[in-house]
Image (tube, rainbow, N blue to C red):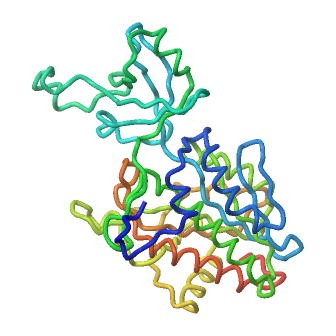
């Protein structure tokens, strides 16, 4: 949480999402936060079999507009306990194996939270050749201080999930770090946009469905089912994207994106060109800074599933610039998050009855 003398204060909805633990398939803590903040503002609020949270506003509106931000994050899942009580695991989502070991982790169990540390063979016990290698997943473990397998299994179970023990903290001004800005930022943005739209429905023709989706990190699975259920004509997925304003990042390969430069609006085959144009128009009208990204194929976001749901959906994508993606200490500028909320609100209010953005 922000230090008392910090001049910048992060929204409680956002910080509660960031501090909740929600590995893919085990999103209960984040669901509870989304329920607490978004449900009161919705006209209709539906959980589903996948764990998605579908909040609808102005249910008789036209067109149907879907906002999607995923609730899940990277995690670990316990797969085996050896005779000495060390826990072996597999990864949930795309981890960088080089940074897994030596981390404090929190394991979610039916009996409460169990603390642990990820371990591997110490560098002093490695040959020169071994020191050059990144350990395989099966060469690392979680140490919970157990004396035996029986002792460990009194506290944890096969299938329990774990996350890194890193919560949200402001670094300087509006720049903060957290374990899972990917994609608690997007879940906050779509939920907060609905909350703000609910305060003034008179300017809203569209039905808005803000969806906190599940299991994005393991294959955009929640987006597949929720977009089928919502059946939108138009959708905007919200995720994080790579900020390239740090050392050792070739912008010729990855594009030019910076913290504090505003939301990144995507163009390419995954994006309906009219949705893209409307997003840019909304940003200009509301005087919101924005950046442009060109993606040559299906994006690594919920947008790729939503676009081809049912008979197809006019889909857009905005991303929050983020440094150090899929690490325990991701970094964003919270002003970019706020600008993204404002962009969605302006985009929704500009839609007129009958708009479907077919081209």
- Location of the C terminus (image quadrant): bottom right
Q: Is residue 276 left or right of residue 227?
A: left
Residue closest to the eye, 157 or 225? 157
Which residue shows up at 54% across the image and 49% down it? 20
Residue closest to the eye, 307 or 120? 120
- The image shows residue 192 at horizontal and vertical percentages of 63, 69
Which residue shows up at 74% across the image and 71% down it? 65
Which residue shows up at 37% across the image and 61% down it? 331
- The image shows residue 181 at horizontal and vertical percentages of 47, 57
The quadrant in which residue 130 appears is top left
- The image shows residue 250 at horizontal and vertical percentages of 26, 64
On screen, residue 125 above or below 70: above
On screen, residue 281 above or below 345: below
On screen, residue 211 above or below 203: above
Residue closest to the eye, 55 or 62? 55
- Location of the N terminus (image quadrant): bottom left
Which residue shows up at 76% across the image and 71% down it? 208
């Amino acid at each position: 949480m922000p230090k008392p003398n910090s001049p910048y204060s992060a929204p409680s909805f956002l910080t509660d999402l960031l501090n909740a633990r929600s590995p893919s398939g085990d999103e209960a803590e984040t669901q509870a936060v989304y329920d607490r903040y978004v449900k009161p503002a919705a006209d209709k609020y539906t959980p589903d079999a996948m764990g998605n949270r579908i909040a609808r506003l102005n249910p008789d509106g036209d067109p149907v507009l879907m906002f999607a931000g995923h609730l899940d994050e990277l995690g670990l899942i316990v797969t085996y306990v050896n005779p000495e009580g060390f826990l072996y695991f597999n990864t949930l989502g795309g981890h960088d194996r080089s940074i897994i070991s030596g981390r404090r982790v929190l394991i979610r169990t039916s009996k409460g939270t169990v603390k642990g540390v990820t371990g591997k063979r110490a560098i002093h016990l490695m040959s020169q050749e071994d020191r050059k290698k990144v350990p395989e997943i099966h060469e690392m473990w979680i140490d919970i201080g157990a004396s035996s397998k029986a002792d460990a299994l009194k506290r944890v179970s096969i299938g329990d999930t774990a996350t890194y023990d890193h919560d949200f903290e402001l670094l300087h001004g509006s720049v903060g770090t957290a374990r899972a800005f990917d994609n608690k930022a997007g879940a906050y943005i779509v939920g907060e946009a609905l909350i703000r739209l609910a305060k003034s429905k008179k300017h809203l023709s569209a039905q808005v469905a803000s969806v906190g989706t599940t299991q994005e990190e393991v294959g955009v699975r929640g987006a597949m089912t929720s977009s089928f259920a919502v059946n939108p004509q138009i959708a905007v997925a919200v995720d994080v994207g790579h900020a390239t304003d740090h050392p050792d990042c070739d912008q010729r390969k990855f594009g030019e994106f910076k913290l504090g430069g505003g939301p990144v609006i995507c163009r390419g085959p995954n994006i309906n060109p009219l949705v893209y144009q409307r997003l840019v128009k909304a940003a200009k009208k509301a005087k919101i800074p924005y950046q442009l990204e060109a993606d040559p194929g299906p994006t690594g976001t919920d947008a790729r599933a939503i676009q081809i749901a049912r008979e197809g959906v006019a889909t857009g994508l905005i991303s929050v610039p983020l440094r150090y993606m899929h690490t325990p200490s991701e970094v964003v500028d919270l002003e970019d998050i706020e600008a993204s909320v404002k962009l969605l609100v302006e985009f929704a209010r500009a839609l007129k009855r009958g708009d479907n953005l077919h081209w």
